[in-house]
Amino acid sequence: MNTIIHKAETRGHANHGWLNSHHTFSFANYHNPERMHFGVLRVLNDDTVAAGMGFGTHPHDNMEIISIPLEGDLEHKDSMGNVAVIKEGDVQVLSAGTGITHSEYNKNKDKEVKFLQIWVFPKERNLDPRYDQVSIRDIAKDNAFYQVLSPNKDDQGVWINQDAWFHLGKFEKGKSDTYKINKEGNGVYAFILEGEVEIEGQKLSRRDGMGIWDTESIDVKATANARVLLMEVPMSL
């Protein structure tokens, strides 16, 4: 088993006034050659957008872009004609493929929106662009990980063009779960949304990240009430 730890305070940080963003991996003006990606996981941004503000229309191509709202309402519009609002309990995927433009705005004029923006390199390039979102409220479990993303169209959660699986878990203090790797050779990047956990003997706190690879399973134990996102991804680009 191999591991790497990224403590919350070591992330890149940019505060633009309307946008307060923390970058686990190199992004925009934050460049760290030792933190370019974890396997095919390219971007993990922890974003807070001010009331009524947002990202104007901009392009993407050949990237799987996943948004997970943590608080508030985020409005999405794209060049395929999709208009949607996502909120906590939803997961959104934008498979950019041959190219797409989109915008993201805080739907509310009186409160912030907080969300994770995650980019994953695609398995195949230049496919048709695609948008999807699902509610995960009815599949959420306590004290166990539940799947919110996979490579399979008919599986639970959203699907993307990559051999990746994402799981969320909400744990009470003292509870634990074992995550089993879905595909040999994949690694897992754990991101602690809230609370404190212990993963393979390593203590982690809010917004810490830990990459684990060369293993078949991972043991996660909550040492305080906690929420955790596990992102299983291929380690080879």
Image: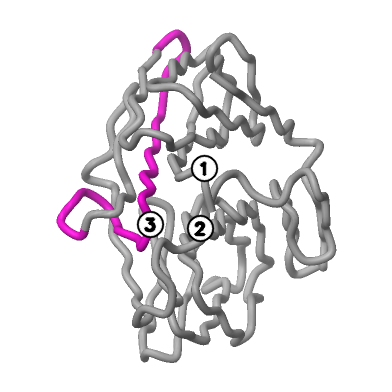
**Gap in angstroms between the C-alphas marked 2 and 3:** 8 Å
Q: Which residues are magenta?
A: 153-175
How many neighbours does mark 1 have within 10 angstroms: few (below 14), some (14-19), or many (20 or more)?
some
Q: Quick one: label 1 or label 2, which is nearer the N terminus?
A: 2
Q: Quickly name the residue at label 3.
A: 162
Image coordinates for residue 37, horizontal then vertical, percent: 64, 49
> Going by the image, does 54 lie left or right of 101?
right
Image coordinates for residue 123, horizontal then vertical, percent: 41, 61
Element class at badge 2: strand
Element class at badge 1: loop
Whether the residues at callouts 2 and 3 have beta carbons within 8 Å, the answer is: yes
Q: Identify the residue at image location x=49%, y=25%.
A: 214
Q: Identify the residue at image location x=29%, y=49%.
A: 136
Image coordinates for residue 3, horizontal then vertical, percent: 62, 24
Q: Quickly name the residue at label 2.
A: 120
Amino acid type, callout 3: Gln
Q: Quickly name the residue at label 1.
A: 235
Report the disc number at residue 217: none
